[in-house]
Image: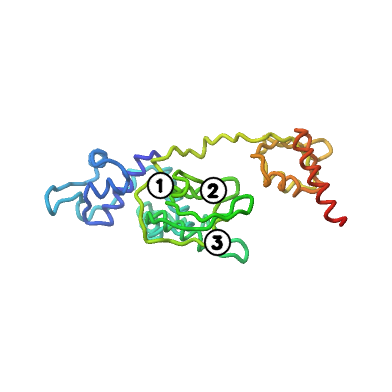
């Protein structure tokens, strides 16, 4: 479904829930111009949806009373996309989502889709759900947050940020935020955020001000070829793309991986223990050998 189609549908939902709404309010809600709002209204009217507007003190954009959306206006595929997208938001406890889902299931004459996805953010014994909820609330309400952040070296730093976006990549949740200390957009791994405080200070900045496109991120890391024992098949297929895996005749695997070179990478390679052998590059192989020697020395003390 196109962005405009999704916006047109949401405009109708807003008008179904509210008696009237101003063009200015819609423009602010969608972060578009008032002129674009009126173009959208014209498109809806052309589609046969009875919308009318009045100017003046008591004016606004309204639907005719007793209007019920004709589900024939939206294809079965688009209906499914709308319901599944909203169900995904339900998994994140998005506000008022249950009410909207119930209404749309009724409009589309569908059985409930409420059980197809569930997301649990907390690790065993932890309370990460509260952290995630606070970040989500800060983004939706445009409220500044303070927290203590631990980098990959374990160093801690206090940050004041304007939270803009949460995203999931490579098995981890991240926060994009404008950092007051660095005066620029920064990415924070959520499980390294501690002691978060949700302030009462608001901000106006939006994610659209920054050129962020996660899908096109280029990884300029080090390419490593490794051989992994067949006993680790469960990890190989969980942690690597299929096109980077070659299964050998004896059942072992040859894997090509690309990662940023840092202490995390060294620790990851070592986590396979005797089940992994680095084939290339030689430099990474030597670094891991040095670390193995240091580990051996610690145990021989």
Q: Are marks 3 and 2 in contact (CB under 8 Å)?
A: no
State the residue at coordinates (15%, 51%).
59
Mark 3, secondary structure of its residue: helix
Labels 1 and 3: the sequence-earlier one:
1
The residue nearer to you, when weighing 129 against 84, is: 129
> Alpha carbon of mark 1 to alpha carbon of mark 3: how far?
33 Å
Give the image location of residue 37, x and y in percent.
Answer: 25, 42
Mark 2, secondary structure of its residue: strand
Q: Name the residue carrying label 3.
A: 128
> Alpha carbon of mark 3 to alpha carbon of mark 2: how far?
15 Å
Instruction: Residue at the far right: name it.
Output: 300
Q: For label 1, count other residues whose C-alpha is less than 10 Å away and answer few (under 14), some (14-19) or many (20+).
A: many
Give the image location of residue 258, x and y in percent.
Answer: 66, 37
Q: Is residue 96 above or below residue 170?
A: below
Labels 1 and 2: the sequence-earlier one:
1
State the residue at coordinates (61%, 61%).
123
Of the two numbered discs 1 and 3 in the rendering, the one whose residue sits closer to the viewer? 3
Left or right, 205 with reference to 24:
right
Left or right, 177 with reference to 246:
left
Q: Name the residue carrying label 1.
A: 79
* Figure quadrant of the C terminus: bottom right
Give the image location of residue 118, x and y in percent.
Answer: 53, 57
Please tell me the numbered disc located at residue 168.
Answer: 2
The residue nearer to you, when weighing 151 against 73, is: 151
Of the two numbered discs 1 and 2 in the rendering, the one whose residue sits closer to the viewer? 2
Instruction: Residue at the far bottom: name it.
Output: 125
Query: Within the image, what quadrant is residue 121 found in?
Result: bottom right
Left or right, 111 with reference to 281:
left
């Amino acid at each position: 479904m196109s962005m405009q189609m999704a916006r047109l549908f949401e405009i109708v939902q807003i008008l179904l829930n509210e008696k009237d709404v101003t063009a200015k309010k819609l423009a602010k809600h969608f972060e578009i111009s008032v002129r674009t709002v009126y173009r959208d209204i014209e498109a809806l009217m052309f589609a046969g949806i009875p919308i009318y507007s009045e100017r003046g003190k008591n004016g606004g954009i309204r639907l005719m009373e007793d209007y019920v959306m004709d589900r024939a206006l939206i294809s079965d595929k688009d209906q499914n996309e709308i319901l599944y997208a909203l169900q995904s938001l339900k998994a994140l406890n998005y506000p008022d989502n249950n009410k909207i889902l119930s209404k749309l299931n009724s409009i589309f004459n569908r059985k409930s889709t409420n059980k197809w996805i569930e997301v649990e953010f907390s690790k065993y014994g932890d309370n990460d759900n509260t952290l995630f909820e606070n970040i989500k609330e800060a983004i939706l309400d445009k409220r500044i947050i303070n927290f203590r952040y631990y980098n990959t070296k374990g160093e801690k730093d206090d940050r004041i940020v304007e939270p803009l976006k949460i995203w999931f990549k490579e098995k981890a949740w991240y926060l994009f935020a404008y950092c007051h200390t660095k005066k620029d957009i920064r990415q924070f791994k959520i499980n390294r955020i501690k002691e978060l405080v949700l302030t009462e200070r608001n901000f106006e900045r939006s994610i659209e001000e920054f050129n962020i496109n996660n899908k096109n991120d280029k990884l300029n890391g080090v390419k490593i070829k490794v051989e992994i024992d067949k006993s680790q098949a469960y990890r190989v297929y969980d942690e690597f793309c299929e096109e980077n895996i070659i299964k050998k005749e004896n059942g072992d695997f040859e894997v090509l991986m690309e990662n940023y070179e840092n202490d995390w990478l060294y620790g990851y390679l070592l986590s396979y223990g005797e089940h992994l052998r680095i084939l290339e590059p030689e430099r990474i192989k030597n670094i891991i050998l040095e670390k193995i020697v240091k580990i051996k020395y610690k145990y021989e003390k």
